[in-house]
Image (cartoon, rainbow, N blue to C red):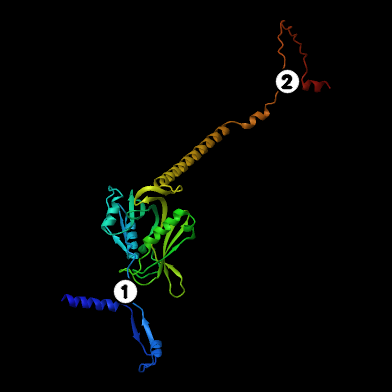
Amino acid sequence: MSAFKRKRGRQTQADRKAKKAKLIADGGEAPVEADQEKNNEVTIPAPVSSGRWTNKERVLIFSSRGINFRTRHLMQDLRTLMPHAKADTKMDRKDKLFIVNEVCEIKNCNKCLFFEAKKKQDLYMWIANSPHGPSAKFLVQNIHTLAELKMTGNCLKGSRPLLSFDPKFDTEPHFALLKELFTQTFSTPRYHPKSQPFVDHVFTFAIADNRIWFRNYQIMEEDAALVEVGPRFVLNLIKIFQGSFGGPTLFENQDFLSPNMHRRQIRLAAAARVREKQMVKEMQKMKKNEAKEDVTKDVTADVFQTPTDETHVHIQMDAPEPKVAKKNKHKAFKRQRMARR
């Protein structure tokens, strides 16, 4: 029985190899000459599945407890687009991050995408090469999933993607390190058992506003146009560590602003606007009171107050002379005067 199995195994291995078939172009009998036989022979290439799977990159995609539904759908979309990805249960928030290396070793994974949720509103993503490093920590912003976008593009499940990087990745050393880390993590290994031998979509990593923008586009066969499939998100780099989930810091983003500080600035700006409105109201009240006082007081009264010359005060020391009363002469009435005439 064992000999039969060995013989059958040899046959299946032989069938997987490339075969040569003799095909006759005219459909008649095979020619006798050897040159004509060589010209009519067509080599059938070996199937894609018979290739050797040499790149054994496996990515573990999981998260901590406390994530929202949007993050859960994003992880599911990434697992769908990456056939070499594996899943695991959520990790407790009280556990240290170096335990992730042990989980990767148990799952036989050498790359990890770990989503860490804080305050049920902030999402951080770790991209690490387990267990030796390096690793990078990002703040994930502007998340849009496949179901949410409802894009017109579509790609085959399990197909191998092309990776497109912005030219700015070659200008800075920390961007060059991230480019190599993204290439090893998001690229599907060739001849992976769960992958398809097609290339019909492209992952785009662009740098704008000191952030990394991730997009997924479908490649149209007709005119090679790009149609967005999704998901999409923005990565704001925080730090790059030498080890896996820790170790010496290789790069730190000085322009990074934590979400707590950002929310604090928003609150301070709102408080400043409220104080400004209160000050405007107080100024308006003061102006109204000043206007009422001006109405009760006549402003034009000062115009008629003309300055006069100063007069010396004369003090009379002697008694005044008595006044002589004049005798009034009797005057006749008008009627008498008229009669005398």
Q: Residue at x 38, y 86 (%)?
A: 41
Q: Amino acid at mark 2?
A: Asp
Residue 206 x, y percent position in the rendering: 46, 59
Alpha-carbon span between mark 1 and mark 2 = 125 Å
Looking at the picture, how far across and down is residue 339, in whole percent? 81, 22
The residue lying toward the viewer, choosing from 184 and 235, is 184
Classify 213 as above or below 246. below
Q: Is residue 232 visible?
A: no
Q: Furthest residue to the front?
A: 34
Determine whether the residue tagged by mark 1 lies in a helix, strand or loop. Answer: helix
**Residue located at (28% from left, 79% from top):** 15
270 in relation to 211, above or below:
above
Q: Classify mark 2: helix, strand or loop.
A: loop
State the residue in front, 217 or 182. Answer: 182
> CB atoms at circles 1 and 2 under 8 Å apart?
no
The spot of residue 118 in percent (x, y) is: 33, 49
Q: Which residue is mark 1?
A: 50
Which part of the image, by quadrant, shows the C terminus? top right
The quadrant holding residue 127 is bottom left
The residue closer to the viewer here, 69 or 197, is: 197
Q: Position of residue 186 (x, y in %)?
A: 37, 62
The residue to which callout 2 is attached is: 309
The structure residue drawn at horizontal position 46% and vertical position 58%, both measured from the top left corner, is 169
Against 169, residue 289 (above or below) is above
